[in-house]
Image (tube, helix red, strand yellow):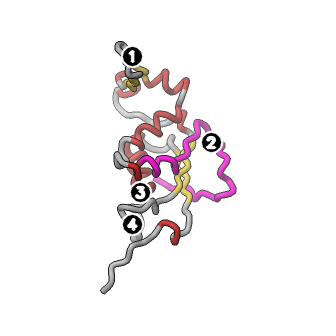
Amino acid sequence: MKTTHVRAETLPERWLLYDASKEPLGRLASKIAVALMGKDRPTYTPSEPNGAFVVVINAQQSVLTGNKEENKYYRTFSGYAGGLKHHSVPKMRATKPEEIVRLAVKRMLPKSNLGRLLLTRLKVYPAAEHPHGAQKPSPVQG
């Protein structure tokens, strides 16, 4: 019996389409992270980027449960003294709604070079329109 090492170049490209307004952000982000890593396929190889390309639409209407809408803050640090900034969820929704989904997925990916490469395969858009119609992404239901 031989062990095979599946290369990313030998696999066909997959494009998946997720709607952020259909389910809670955490559940959506975990499903997206699994699809980006390729863990939903039998050809999963930990050292290869053999996952799917993921398009997320309607990031503006992403669902947060409980009191997260009022209590959750996103923090950024400039590296300088006094450079810690807090951004509330309503402010993030108004300025950068796609960043809410991107950060949720980023924090569920491996913290390595491969994780950063996988994050480039994630395309997030605030509304229902996206420029990836030519790739024919298949919609994923719940």
Q: In this view, does 72 lie to the left or right of 137?
A: left
- Residue lying at the far front in this picture: please name it: 80
Residue 139, by quadrant, is bottom right
Other-residue count near label 3 (Cα within 10 Å), few / some / many at <14 / 14–19 / ≥20: many
- Marks 2 and 1 sit apart, C-alpha to C-alpha, by 35 Å
Q: In which quarter of the image is residue 14?
A: bottom right
- Amino acid type for the residue under numbered disc 2: Ala
Residue for badge 2: 128
Element type at mark 3: helix
Residue 94 image offset from top left, x and y in percent: 55, 24
Q: Which amino acid does label 1 sit on?
A: Gly
- Measured along the vertical axis of the image, is residue 49 above or below residue 55? below
Count every numbered label the image shows and give the total.
4
Residue 12 position, x and y percent, is 55, 68
The N terminus sits in image quarter: bottom left
Q: Where is residue 30 in the image (x, y as percent from the top left)?
A: 38, 48
Mark 3, residue position: 37
N-term mark: 3 or 1 = 3
Residue 81 relative to residue 89: left or right:
left
Disc marking residue 83: 1
The answer to whether the residues at label 3 and label 2 have Cβ atoms under 8 Å apart is no
Magenta-span inclusion, residue 140? yes
Q: In front: mark 3 or mark 1?
A: 1
Residue 129 vertical position relative to residue 1 in the rendered view, above or below: above
